[in-house]
Image (cartoon, helix red, strand yellow):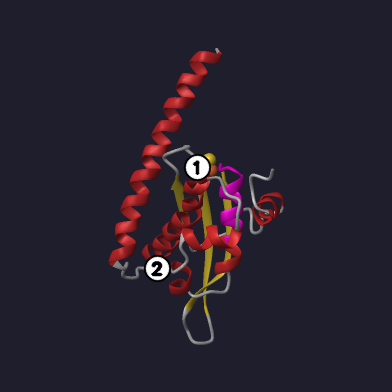
Amino acid sequence: MPIYSKKIIQHFKRPKNVGKIKNPNGTGEAGNLLCGDLMKLYLKIGKNKKNEEFIKDIKFETLGCAVAVANTSLLTTLVKGKTIKEALEIKKEDLIEKLGKPLPPFKIHCSILAVDALKEAIYDYYKRSGKKIPPELEIEHQRITRIKNQAEGRYKEFRKLEEEVLK
Ligand code: FES
């Protein structure tokens, strides 16, 4: 019996937009408290014909599971070419729906890494370019930073314990 949808497996085996962008104008990191996994996303923002800021290029690196890879791969394909406003409208529920079933319920938390890392990369872009940060994005930034720091702390503790056990 399959545990993941065909789409999850496809995106995991052949993820789109993996890697780094040289001289990005926004980067974002997010962590998952439940598993300690981390996601890093790079953005290149440009201006479209209507003079709106849009996502010209996007890439990601992760220490995440198959579902996190699939979600982020899908997200990058959805937001490439979209304006920042449109990109911020994509929710984890949209990714879950598009990837389809089955998805084990305990893997639902894996979908948040992609959207959180994107919010952080856009936040970073606004900061670097001296733009006013929308209040909702500021609140999200504080939440994501708190979780990422906790996840990193737990990972470090785990590594310390692991080193002691394995020495
Ligand atoms: S188990 Fe950590 S992101 Fe999926």
Residue 28 image label: none
Compared to residue 4, the image places residue 85 above or below, namely: below
The secondary element bearing badge 1 is classed as helix
- Magenta residue check for 68: yes
Q: Which residue is mark 2?
A: 129
* Nearest to the observer: residue 5 or residue 34: 5
Q: Is residue 41 above or below residue 152?
A: below
Question: Measured from the top left, where is residue 114 in percent x and y?
Answer: 51, 55
Q: CA distance from mark 1 to mark 2?
A: 38 Å
Instruction: Bin the neighbour count of mark 1 within 10 Å (Cα to Cα): few under 14, some 14-19, many 20 and up.
Output: few
Q: Residue 26 magenta-drawn?
A: no
Residue hosting label 1: 106
Say whether residue 58 is left or right of residue 125: right
- Asked if residue 26 can be seen in this view, the reply is no
Mark 1 residue type? Phe
Q: Which residues are magenta?
A: 63-74
- In this image, 17 relative to 166: left or right? right
Instruction: Characterize the magenta stretch by its predominant secondary structure.
Output: helix
* Of callouts 1 and 2, the N-terminal one: 1
